[in-house]
Image: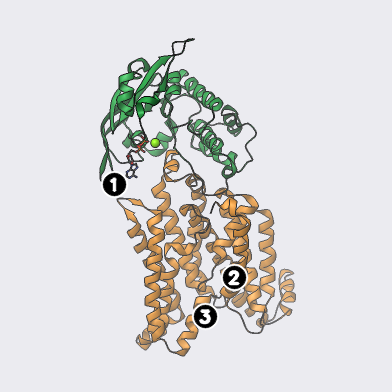
Chain colours: A orange, B green
Amino acid sequence: MLVLSGLLVLTSVASLTTGASGASLWKALTQLVQGEEISLRERVILFDIRLPRLIMGILVGAALAVSGAVMQGLFRNPLADPGLVGVGAGAGLGAISAIVLGSFLPLGMQASLGYFMVPAAAFVGGWVSTIVLYRIATHRGRTSVAVMLLGGIALGALTGALSGILIYMADDSQLRDLTFWGLGSLAGATWDKIWLAAPLIMLALAATPFLARSLNALALGEAPAAHLGIPVQRMKNISILSVAAAVGAAVAASGGIGFIGIVVPHLLRLLIGPDHRFLLPNAALLGAVLLLAADMISRTIIAPAELPIGIVTATLGGPFFLWILLRNRSLLDL
Amino acid sequence: MLDARDIRVSLAGTPVLQGVHFRARPGQVTTIVGPNGSGKTTLLRAMTQEASYSGEVTLDGEDISRLPGWQLAARRAVLPQASRIAFPFTVFEIVRLGLTASAEAAQESRVSEALDRVGLAGFEGRFYQELSGGEQQRVQLARVLTQVWEPIGAEGARWLFLDEPVSSLDIGHQLEVMSLLAAYAQAGGGVIAVMHDLNLTAMYADDIAILADGRVLRQGPPSAVLTDSLLSEAYGCAVRVNAAPAGDVPFILPHMASIS
Ligand SMILES: Nc1ncnc2c1ncn2[C@@H]1O[C@H](COP(=O)(O)OP(=O)(O)O)[C@@H](O)[C@H]1O
Ligand SMILES: [Mg+2]
């Protein structure tokens, strides 16, 4: 935990000083720490571009990793992903609708919604699909995790089909927007977006420490957890709503960023074991560190252009995930 | 005192329990026996709110379905028939779960003490998934024991609900665990165990309920239940209850000739 906190500080500083405008910012940062004046240009880059990007990276990384750990605990499956609650598919449909159908809105409305239209639609889409899925899976006050899992696949296919129709209707520039949104990026981070996403993500993260003991008990199964005095249905409600809020806000703010939610909890279980009391806070830290690192790679690898961060996390995360899987077959009990 | 009255359970449309009456007293080992599929597990699941039932289950006069989960967790612990764990937890972490649900403020050393009682001293750091079936069963028993460690608490007797607690154990560990349960009852706690082995039942049970086809054929002391005619009726094969020359404990031998 200490190690990870230190690592987060290091990557944060590195992230602030990495990017298209070069090394002079390191100087500016040291000047700032020593209380000296820095130029307006450096101030703008540091406070209006790099800092919001850094904070968004920390928030999104923590949100995705912690949500992944919570979902895996809830579904009792190390391969569960935050996307399972239907948030990803719904958010994708929302974003695509906004990009493609947005141009049909009256110009005045387009102007007033501005660039908030896509994230807002993504958030609403994510929430709606989660609530629908949750309703489907809840029968007589009990939520079936298995029904939710399978229903999620059905709902994902349906939203995928609807998205497909919209994509078919899209013109070239919209297609480009769509592709970039789908791959995810922190480049669009602004203070405005942070003020919208941060409260949701923070609230959801603040709920998770109360889930740790319940998630540990749930590893035994739902009935044994109930016999240990865990209010199983209440903890399911809290888990699913927190994950929908955190992932919805994260996806709305930065598009679809994969693998953080699976790789981070896995890695931590290997390092510190599956106890959620330690897993959840460490997942927040490691998720933030890894996303910042991926963001730095995405900014520098084809500089001065930027690679979408989703490509970086998928290229590194995919093989890594396979490697974990093959190495730990016996412990994962697959 | 645990009292279950007129318990009816239907699973997938078929009636599995058809008006079962069952009671158990603290200070006694009460066992539930009967052939496969007679509804033993279902009865235990109804009495622990895992299966929905009609009828009434009371614990010391209180309707059990009205008690909040945390209060029930302080008074009774439940051992399922089989247990799979989702993540690579260690034995220590599994047993500690019982401790966190316990009403007693106990030290973590209780975990080792419980493991010692079930013959697993030194297993704390092992991965649960890498143990044999019998070892896993005893880890779960240790977890259940730490949850209701003292047989009598402030609210009265504590209870152990166990579904075939010795089914995967070798004979030495079977005796060890059964003696442990008998000692728990002796100290004032209540023990309700679904049992497969009639000889172990004969040795340790104070009270036996015998089930067949979702009904209790009879409940009473071993001498009243372990009879040739009742057992033959319940299990659908001829058995004869005998007494070992040394003691007054009856034992049951199947008669091969009459099965065919
Ligand atoms: N989930 C279920 N759905 C339908 N039938 C069930 C279910 N669980 C058990 N049964 C049936 O109920 C009967 C009693 O089962 P159970 O209580 O597990 O028996 P046992 O006495 O061997 O523990 C059996 O006939 C079994 O097939
Ligand atoms: Mg059974």
Label 1 residue SS = loop
**Neighbours of disc 2 within 10 Å: few (<14), some (14-19), many (20+):** many
The amino acid type of the residue labelled 2 equals Thr
Q: CA distance from mark 2 to mark 1?
A: 46 Å
> Alpha-carbon distance for marks 3 and 2?
14 Å
Q: Between B138 and A260, which is closer to the camera in this rendering?
A: B138
Q: CA distance from mark 3 to mark 1?
A: 49 Å
Residue in the image at 53% along x and 26% along y? B171
Left or right for A8, reference B161: right
Q: Position of residue A333 (x, y in %)?
A: 55, 51
Regarding ligand 2, which quadrant of the image does it lie in? top left
Q: Residue at x 47, y 67 (%)?
A: A249
Going by the image, does B93 lie left or right of A252?
A: right
Q: Which residue is mark 3?
A: A180
> On the picture, is A183 further left or further right than A316?
left
Badges 2 and 1, same chain: no
Closest to the observer: A70 or A323?
A: A323
Residue A285 seen in render: no
Q: What amino acid is labelled 1 in the image?
A: Ala
Residue B12 badge: 1
Q: Is mark 1 within 8 Å of ligand 1?
A: yes
Query: Label 2 belongs to which residue?
Result: A313
Q: Is residue A165 above or below residue B196?
A: below
- The amino acid at mark 3 is Phe
Per the image, label 3 sits on a secondary structure element best described as: helix
